[in-house]
């Protein structure tokens, strides 16, 4: 089925460093969502993007909806230990209560 | 506002047995989703309900999986009989807020981790 390509698959960084990850697709999506999942928990919504070119921030997190509608980026500034987890991008082809297509996830590990 | 509730949190069964998972969505959310998340992968949609009607069940293995949302609120997902490859986390999500702004955003429950031995 439809798959989003998320990279990198894993990251090992030092506390305080900035983080960048991205998600690409061969298809156009009209909504991009970024989630974080901690072990044993469900994904938690971080940022939602609705318009091509949109840049949205949530604290130290910033995400962008690519102009081509085929990609999205998530940046985390000044990482802290609680940022550890798996980050998923998800896209919706049609805005509304339609199914999400998820990327494979980026596992973030932070060395204190 | 209470989040999406799921139970049980963990379940271990033998292959060929049956199992059921329960989900209660966020109050007022019309749309409910069941996802399967295999270890190391992103969630994959199994079935989507709008109120008590099925909108999308194209990826639901209907020979063994079934789901219902009889009163348009909580939902049950059943597997009968279970196979080894059904070992996964089963996530329930809901969307649709009366204010409209959050209409397109899905909120997930903690999931049920199923192990089939």
Image: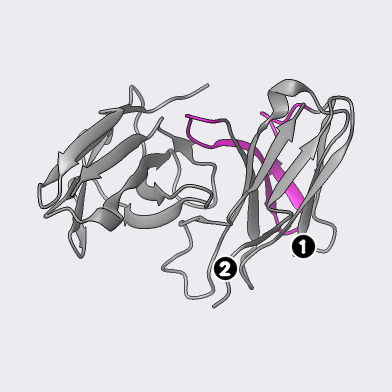
Q: Earlier in the sequence, mark 1 or mark 2?
A: 2
Is residue A24 shown in magenta?
A: no
Please provide percent x and percent y for residue B76: 80, 51
Gap in Å between the C-alphas at discs 1 and 2?
A: 17 Å
Dividing the image into 4 quarters, which one contains the N terminus of chain B? Answer: bottom right
Q: Secondary structure at mark 2?
A: loop
Looking at the image, which is closer to me, A76 or A66?
A: A76
Looking at the image, which is closer to me, A35 or A19?
A: A19
Is B61 rendered above or below residue B29?
above
What's the residue at 83%, 64% (across, down)?
B71
What's the chain of the residue with tag 1? B
What's the residue at 14%, 50% (across, down)?
A15
Is A58 positioned to the left or the right of B61 in the image? left
Task: Between label 1 and label 2, give the one nearer the viewer.
Answer: 2
Q: Residues within 10 Å of mark 1 (few under 14, many from 20)?
A: some
Residue B3 tag number: 2
Res A99 → quadrant: top right
Q: Which residue is mark 1?
A: B72
What's the chain of the residue with tag 2? B
Q: How is the image coloured?
A: one colour
Is residue B55 shown in magenta?
A: yes
Dividing the image into 4 quarters, which one contains the C terminus of chain B? Answer: top right
Magenta-colored span:
B39-61
Q: Residues within 10 Å of mark 2 (few under 14, many from 20)?
A: some
User: Residue extending furthest front?
Assistant: A112
Residue B56 shows in the view: no
Please provide percent x and percent y for residue A63: 21, 50
Looking at the image, which is closer to me, A88 or A33?
A: A88
């Amino acid at each position: 089925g439809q798959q989003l390509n998320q990279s990198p698959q894993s990251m090992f960084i030092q506390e305080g460093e900035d983080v960048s990850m991205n998600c690409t697709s061969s298809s156009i999506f009209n909504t991009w969502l970024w989630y974080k999942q901690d072990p044993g928990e469900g994904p938690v919504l971080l940022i939602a993007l609705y318009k091509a070119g949109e840049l949205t921030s949530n604290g130290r997190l910033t995400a962008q909806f690519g102009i081509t509608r085929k990609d999205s980026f998530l940046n985390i500034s000044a990482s802290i230990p609680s940022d550890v987890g798996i980050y998923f991008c998800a896209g919706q082809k049609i805005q509304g209560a339609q199914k999400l297509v998820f990327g494979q996830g980026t596992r973030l590990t932070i060395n204190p | 506002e209470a989040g999406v509730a799921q139970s049980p949190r963990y379940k271990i069964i033998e292959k060929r047995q049956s199992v059921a998972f329960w989900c209660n969505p966020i109050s007022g959310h019309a749309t409910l989703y069941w996802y399967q998340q295999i270890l190391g992968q992103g969630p994959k949609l199994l079935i989507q309900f709008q109120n008590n009607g099925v909108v999308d069940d194209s990826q639901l293995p209907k020979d063994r999986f079934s789901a219902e949302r009889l009163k348009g609120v909580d939902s049950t997902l059943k597997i009968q009989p279970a196979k080894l490859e059904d070992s996964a986390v089963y996530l329930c999500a809901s969307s649709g807020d009366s204010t409209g702004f959050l209409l397109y955003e899905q909120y997930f429950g903690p999931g049920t981790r199923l192990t089939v031995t």
